[in-house]
Image (cartoon, coloured by chain):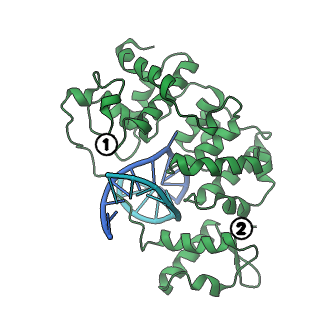
Chain colours: A green, B cyan, C blue
Amino acid sequence: MPAEHDELTAPIADWYADHARELPWRGADVDPWAVMVSEFMLQQTPVARVIPAFEAWLTRWPSPAALAADSPGEAVRMWGKLGYPRRALRLHAAASEITTSHGGVVPRTVEALRSLPGVGDYTAAAIAVFGYGERAPVVDTNVRRVLHRAVLGAADAGPTTTKADMALCESLLPDRPTEAARLSIALMELGALVCTAASPSCGVCPVSDECAWQLAGRPEYAGPPKRVQRFAGTDRQVRGKLLDVLRAADEPVGKERLDVVWSDDTQRERALAGLLDDGLAQQTTDGRFALPA
DNA sequence: GAAGCGTGGCA
DNA sequence: TTGCCAAGCTT
């Protein structure tokens, strides 16, 4: 382990051993496919809401081939109200690709994983590291926040992951893959439970005495502004309402069933067109609407 | 590189 | 109430 940050990373790894939550995707019997499903679901979505969806999903589709054998529409339906339903579409597409091009086995390397639909830098690393024990920097919003505070002395990370973030994380990783994986999950857990965004619990933090942000006197955030996305009244809200109708229906629905969910015709039509364009919905030959077959 | 993409809990 | 936030990805 790099000596220069030993005093920071060792206590965090130790802290994790005593404070890790028991989550269904952390069990000893969890395979890479389960890790992959959990990582897709956890993108921008709180743990508490993912847990039941994760269990139901794996019960129904215990392998990539099982999911690939079903329709993308069923994946979207099963996704329920987790949000960002394009993730369901991409998970289905990834499962299909795994089935046809990888012998039904979730790829092991970051590079191969990265080429799958819906898999970016974070998700590829998470599957490789937590699913296979590979050594790679796993950089999510929690890790970035913890490192920017504890190492760089800033109040928070910037709005997007940078190459510098990745390099910093990499520089902290122990040489042994098992220890590197443990540090990564520990950094994420510390960010999720202690070093939180709004009101960190520095009083119980294992590295508060070494934290560069503390030592600097907790300066204010000085990075580029983080835009908060409005939801009420946006196309996203309308898309959600439209898709909710399609998910609940067990057969194609007539347009009148969709027209009642939003009064602004222009916006509603635009949202519906967007869903069709994204492949989240399709029109049947008789003009009705349904989830993709 | 900014913008778009769901949903719901919480302060 | 309203704004902020939650294990990002794609175009």
Residue A146 position by quadrant: top left
* Residue A113 visible to an observer of this rendering: yes
Residue B2 position by quadrant: bottom left
Q: Nearer the viewer, mark 1 or mark 2?
A: 1
Residue A106 in the image: x percent, y percent? 71, 38
* Residue A163 visible to an observer of this rendering: no
Q: Decide: is B10 above or below A3.
A: below
Amino acid at pointer 1: Ser
Disc assigned to residue A90: none
Q: Mark 2 lies on which chain?
A: A
Q: Distance between the residues labelled 1 and 2?
A: 42 Å
What is the quadrant of the N terminus of chain A in the image?
top left
Disc 1: which residue? A199
Amino acid at pointer 2: Pro
The answer to whether A291 appears left or right of A258 in the picture is right
* Viewer-side residue, A26 vs A228: A26
Disc 2: which residue? A292
Residue A169 in the image: x percent, y percent? 43, 28
Residue A242 position by quadrant: bottom right
Residue at 63 percent across and 87 percent down: it is A256
The answer to whether A67 appears left or right of C5 in the picture is right
